[in-house]
Image (cartoon, rainbow, N blue to C red):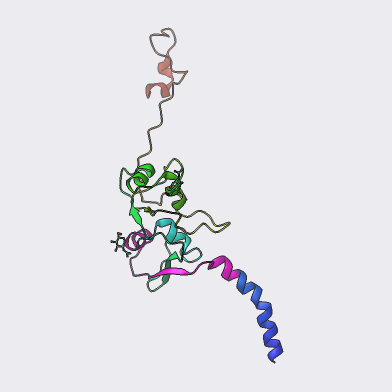
Amino acid sequence: MFAATALVAFLALPFTCQFAFSVAAADCARKYTVKAGDYCDQISAANNASTYQLAVTNIGKINEDCKNLQPGQDICLGFVGQDCTNTYVVKAGDTCTGVAAKHGLNTTLFNHNNPQLHAECDNLYIGEVVCVGGGPAVPPLPAGAPMPAATIPPGAQPATPPKAEPVEDDEDCDDEEDNEDEDDENLPWCDEL
Ligand SMILES: *[C@@H]1O[C@H](CO)[C@@H](O)[C@H](O)[C@H]1NC(C)=O
Ligand SMILES: *[C@@H]1O[C@H](CO)[C@@H](O)[C@H](O)[C@H]1NC(C)=O
C-alpha cells in the first residue's frame, strides 16, 4: 500500500516540477484581489505595476485582451526581485524618449524594462503603464511566450499620432506645365494629389 502510493508520487513528481517551473518560476512579491469593474491598465496604474509586468506575472491566468478577470480572483503584481514599482501612466503626446528622459533613464534601460514597445515607439498608447524604475526591474518574458501588450488595444489611442504618409511623386501624374499635350485628367487618382 505504502509502496504503491510512493510509486505514484514518484511518477507524478517530474510533471509537477515541470509545471511549477514553467508557470511559477518566481515567487509573487505583491498580490491583488480583483474587484468588479476592474480592467488591467487600471489595476496597473493604481498599483504601480506596468502593463507588461502585470501581463507577464499572470501568464495563463489573465488572457491577452484582459477580458477574463473575475471579482475575487487573486492576481500577482510582481515577482520577488523582478518587480518594478516605479511606473508612469502614458498621456497624449508622450514619446518613449521623452518619458525616459523625464525620469532620468537612458533608452536602453527604458526599453529593457518595457520590452513590448517597438524601437520606433509606435505602439505606445494613452493609458499604458510603463516602468520608469532605474536598473533592470521587470520579469523577463518566459521562453516561447508571446510578447504581451505589443499592439495597441482596441479603443486605445497611440500616444503619438502616426506621422502622415509622405506624398509620393506619382510619375503618371505629370505637372501640367511639363506636359501640355497629355491629358492627366482622365486618370482619376491624379486629381487627388
Ligand atoms: C504608487 O506610486 C506612487 C508614487 O510613487 C505612490 O504615491 C503610491 O502610493 C504608490 N501606490 C501603490 C499602491 O504602491
Ligand atoms: C543606461 O543606464 C544604465 C543605468 O544607469 C547604465 O548601467 C547603462 O550603462 C546605460 N547605458 C547607456 C547606453 O548609456
Which quadrant of the figure contains the C terminus?
top left
What percent of the width, then of the height, locates residue 24? Answer: 53, 68
What percent of the width, then of the height, locates residue 178? Answer: 41, 8
Tag count: 0
What percent of the width, then of the height, locates residue 189? Answer: 42, 24
In magenta segment, residue 181: no
Q: Residue at x 42, y 43 (%)?
A: 121
Task: Kindly indicate the quadrant of the structure image that contains residue 179.
Answer: top left
In magenta segment, residue 25: yes
Q: Left or right? Give the position of 57 relative to 39.
A: right
Query: What is the span of residues highlighted in magenta in the rendered image?
Result: 19-47
Q: Using the image as rendered, state which of residue 30 and residue 71 is in the foreground.
A: 30
| Above or below for 191 versus 165 | above
Q: Residue at x 40, y 57 (%)?
A: 51
Q: Left or right? Give the position of 159 relative to 118.
A: left
Q: Using the image as rendered, state which of residue 13 and residue 101 is in the foreground.
A: 101
What percent of the width, then of the height, locates residue 31? Answer: 40, 70
| Above or below for 141 versus 72 | above
Question: Which residue is most to the top?
Answer: 181
